Amino acid sequence: MKFSLSISLLMTAFLLTTACNAPATEKTPKTVETVQAMVAKPDMAKVKAEIQALENAYADSDNANNANAIAALYTDDAVSLNNHEPMSIGKAAILKSQTAGMAKKKKGTTVTYDIMDVYGDENQVTEVGKFIRKDAAGKVERTGKYMAVWEKRDGKYLCVRDISNNDAKEVAQ
């Protein structure tokens, strides 16, 4: 009995020693590849379409002078950096800025937003775009560019940061 117990202990020690000292196998790269394959990359074309729909809603609200609808696209802690005005911190400040801007707008003025690029993941997206503002007759009043950071909260994208500015007017030669 003692002999078989000794043999069993020696065999266990031998197996543990050889298993711990075994050379590394090539499984690590395959494991990494498997994990990478399991982590799905976001469909950025789909994300871009979602963000463009939000920009279209923003434009529709701007064109209808509906500052409340625009403010609803922002988080409570959002920050907006508009051209030629102080930073708007929080949804209430953004609403106030939008309302003031709409009061100065000429009747019939419209704006469109065109996304040039989006990057990030499905939870946070940075958008780069351009805008065109036209008067009631369809003449371009100004153009500009913007960036916006969108976060998915409770299943929908909301803007957490944005910045925009007008393009320089062309100088007549």
Image (cartoon, rainbow, N blue to C red):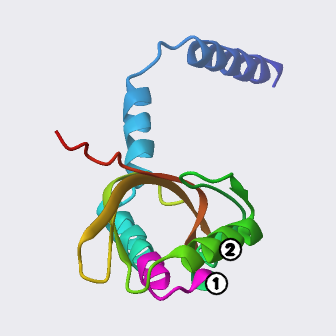
Give, as a three-letter code, the residue at label 2: Leu
Query: Which circle marks residue 95 in the picture?
Result: 2
**Residue in the foreground of this view, choosing between 109 and 5:** 109
Give, as a three-letter code, the residue at label 1: Asn
Badge 2 marks a residue whose secondary structure is helix
Question: Residue shown at 58%/74% (left/top)?
Answer: 73
Percent from the top left, x then y, of residue 98? 61, 72
Badge 1 marks a residue whose secondary structure is helix
| Distance CA(mark 2)–CA(mark 1) | 7 Å
Residue at the front extreme, as displayed:
173
| 2 or 1: tag closer to the N-terminus | 1
Residues drawn in magenta: 57-67
Question: Residue shown at 64%/77% (left/top)?
Answer: 99
**Residue in the foreground of this view, choosing between 153 and 100:** 100
Q: Is residue 170 left or right of residue 159?
A: left
Residue 21 vs 45, above or below: the answer is: above
Percent from the top left, x then y, of residue 83? 53, 52
SS majority, magenta: helix
Question: Residue shown at 65%/19% (left/top)?
Answer: 16
Residue at image mark 1: 68
Percent from the top left, x then y, of residue 159? 58, 64
